[in-house]
Image: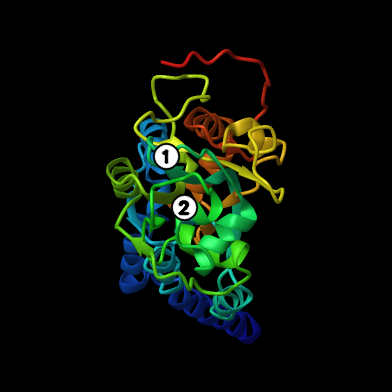
Amino acid sequence: MNHFNKLVGLTLLLGLFLSCGNKPNPEKEKAYQEAASVLTADESFYPIIDEELFYFQKHTLDSITPLYINEQDAVAKLMKLETWLAFTTRDFTAKERQNLIDRKYLPRAIPVAYDGLAIIVNNTNPDSCITIKDFARILKGEVSKWSDIYPQNKLGEIDVVFDNPLSSTVRWCVDSILGGQQFSAKNIGAVKTSAAVIDYVENHTNALGIIGSNWLNDKRDTTNVTFKKNISVMGVSKMDSAKSYNSWKPYQYYLYNGNYPLRRTIYALLNDPRPNGIPTGFAHFVQLPKGQMIILRSGLLPRTANMNVRDVIVRRE
């Protein structure tokens, strides 16, 4: 009898400890839900993320609000646990990943698509091709006039414009074009958004803009082989001399076969501690065939979708 009483007492005591351990924490739940209600993304991904969210919320009835900011702030909010999901053009750094692991999280970087960094100029610019080498020379300040690259070009100073000083576009150029060196050219500026870059280039004959290629597509063209007609997209060459036959524009096929040299990977940086959380659900939706098809229709290169290559005829107006 005494042994039975001790066993019952031990069972009750263990049950008490377990129930205390599973007691809901309202403050932690509130913090989780607040972070789960929003995702962050580099502003340059606005067109594609908005379309992905439209279909995701239509099919799942789940709700998550996008916050389009610069890439640096998007990742900062993820590290501060103000969101569980950020869309960027880079993986976690080793320091960021270890920081989250030390806090008992499981950060994941999910490649979802590829885009091209597009170089755009005014429609009056007579030159349509540029080399990687000359692009780097512009960013370094080694050349400042269009005639320094193209002797017959009379447009004067090269007016370089980016979307945002802290954007993925700026960081990618610093890392991948300049090998980590900061811009040294005096004629480089930034507006606020990718749309503003397009407007600026359209209205300044000597401008050179750098934006993500998902802002370029002419929505009237379902084949994704024509770009907006209010600006010109430059062909980019890996060679020392840029010609029409060795320069490529950020069409899907040239992203696919590697001809276009300014290709970037788009990542979903996920730190959702719940496997059934809405941020996790949306990140996985973008990976699924429906989400990948949306990426394909946008003009970007999906990570996993099946692709068909076919010849098309483009009529010039």
Number of numbered discs? 2
Q: Quadrant of residue 80?
A: bottom left
Judge the density around disc 1: few (<14), some (14-19), many (≥20) Cα neighbours within 10 Å: some
Give the percent coordinates (x, y) of residue 47. 38, 40
In the image, 179 versus 207, the foreground residue is 207
Please identify the quarter of the rendering in which residue 63 is found.
Answer: top left
Q: CA distance from mark 2 to mark 1?
A: 10 Å
Nearest the viewer among 240 and 90 is 240
Crowd band around label 2 with a 10 angstrom C-alpha radius: few (<14), some (14–19), many (20+): many
Residue type at the position of mark 2? Trp
Coloration of the structure image: rainbow
Residue occupied by mark 2: 146
Which residue is depicted at the point 60% across and 75% down? 101
Contact (Cβ within 8 Å) of mark 2 with mark 1? yes
Q: Is residue 98 above or below residue 210?
A: below
Q: Give the percent coordinates (x, y) of residue 162.
A: 39, 57
Most foreground residue, 116 or 103? 116
Name the residue carrying label 1.
125
Camera-side residue of 88 and 250: 250
